Amino acid sequence: MMNEPTPGSQMMFRHDAHSLSHVGCVRQLNEDRSFAAPAIGIWAVADGMGGHHAGDFASETIVRHLQQVESAATPADLEAAFRAVLQHANAEIFQYAQRQGNLVVGSTFVGLLCFGSLFRCYWCGDSRAYLLRNDSLTQISRDHTEVQELLDQGLLTAEEAASYPRRNAITQAVGVAEQLHMDYVDGEIRAGDAFLLCTDGLTNHLSDLEIGKLMTGRRASDICHDLVNLALSRGGTDNVTVNIVQFFSASATIPVNGPIARPQTVGGAG
């Protein structure tokens, strides 16, 4: 669980957040979903898989369950509620697939939980989380993919991985097995931090260096639009979804609109 804040470490932040999803230039159906509930401290992105409307069912099921999470009194309470709804979503998707004749139906997922000055990032699959801090971009998730496993084992170089024929084969997803597996990383939020959650429709077309440049010193809505537009200009071969949240000190002046108070879901036909 997320550790309780130590005395004096609790910080109050202002934040700016924005989400954007596009069907892309090739696909007819948007199976991505993006979710944001700033008042609760949850941001997430899901990328459905399965085709024939099964993929959008999977990602939509995750978002529908996330909408059930309420404000928590402690980081542990927030994490427990979050994990519970993801387990329920996993069970619903898995049972749906069984009823459809044992189809493989699921969704990649990446979620950010924030409480006070603490964050925890969960992921399952190849949807990614990035942290921009002091103008330096770091991927804080680690892909659950066949190619990442080969890289970790030293069986592929980075150059070979770029052209590996099964580079998009994922090894984990929500709903593909009875037991849900997610990895996570913990950290402490600092004023000026910006998090990006995104599907592989973005990272298939943009390098980390390009993403970092577009995120630096700019408002969340502009970042989202420029990231998506650049992916589309390079072919938009998949649905592309981005979810940005930036944190500022309580005294900072934010030259943007205030945070969204209600939970927001992005994705679908658009």
Image: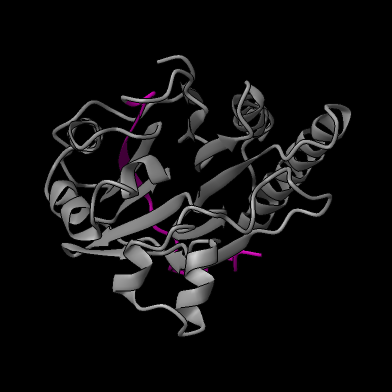
Magenta stretch contains residue 110:
no
Q: In this view, does 173 lie to the left or right of 255?
A: right
Residue 6 visible? The answer is no
Vertical side of 211 occupied by 262: above or below: above
* Quarter of the image that includes the C terminus: top left
From the top left corner, tell me how far across and down residue 268 is, in percent: 49, 19
Q: Going by the picture, which residue comes out furthest to the bottom?
A: 154
From the top left corner, tell me how far across and down residue 153 is, in percent: 51, 83
* Quarter of the image that includes the N terminus: bottom right
Residue at (34, 61) in percent of width and height: 163
Q: Going by the picture, which residue comes out furthest to the top?
A: 269
Residue at (59, 36) in percent of width and height: 49
Q: In which quarter of the image is residue 220?
A: top left
For the magenta stretch, what is the residue range? 1-24
Vertical side of 16 occupied by 209: above or below: below
From the top left corner, tell me how far across and down residue 217 is, in percent: 11, 48
Between 76 and 269, the one nearer to me in the picture: 269
